[in-house]
Image (tube, grey):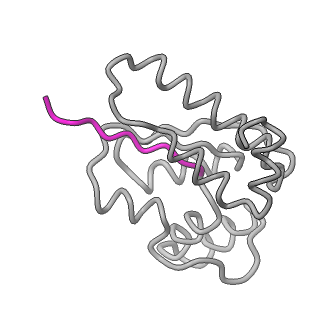
Amino acid sequence: MPKERVLVSWIGHADLCGMAETMAEPQKAELLAAVKIGGKYGETPGPLETAVNNRAFSEIHLLSNYPAKVNKQFANWLGGKTVIHQVKLDNPTDYTTIFELADHFLREVAARRETLRQTLAWAVDQIVNRSRKHKEVLMKLGLA
């Protein structure tokens, strides 16, 4: 039985900028305005596009707090079996909430897929490690 690969991540500014670089100017400006990105941010290809272009994934699950229209555009652009999971996040630097949302989602994925043999914890680690306050987050959650 082939090993299944499941990609779980957040859609970030660098990912959207990667998509924007492939668009004509009016659509690019509209996208960047919709997600409130000013100026150049990130390089192409973005992190998610790089992952998808270099590995075959049986499933792609992306968490996003961007507008539904942007999410749909991104899923179509990225291709594959991309499923966007809309989440509400009032503050993009609220790392405790980010961790809790990611942890909750990973538990749902694992519960739905009894045969899932790979760990999805890296996604949570990636989110926590991006935080300058990751020790504080871990302490608040009782994990340190």
Image quadrant occupied by the N terminus: top left
Q: Residue furthest bottom?
A: 40
Decide whether residue 6 is among the magenta residues. yes
Q: Residue furthest front?
A: 144
Residue 94 % position (x, y):
83, 49
| Residue beneath the point at 35% across and 26% down | 116
Q: Is residue 11 left or right of residue 120?
A: right
The one of 76 and 82 positioned closer to us in this rendering: 82
Count of all numbered marks drawn on residues in the image: 0
- Magenta stretch: give its range: 1-10
Image quadrant occupied by the C terminus: top right
The one of 53 and 31 positioned closer to us in this rendering: 53
Residue 79 % position (x, y):
38, 50
| Residue beneath the point at 68% across and 73% down | 29
Q: In the picture shown, does residue 60 fall above or below 1? A: below
| Residue beneath the point at 59% across and 64% down | 16
Q: In the picture shown, does residue 89 fall above or below 12? A: above
Q: In the picture shown, does residue 129 fall above or below 56? A: below
| Residue beneath the point at 54% across and 43% down | 62
The one of 37 and 102 positioned closer to us in this rendering: 102
- Give residue 107's quadrant in the image: top right
Decide whether residue 13 is among the magenta residues. no
Residue 134 % position (x, y):
74, 55
The one of 47 and 73 positioned closer to us in this rendering: 47
Q: Is residue 52 left or right of residue 56?
A: right
Residue 5 % position (x, y):
31, 41
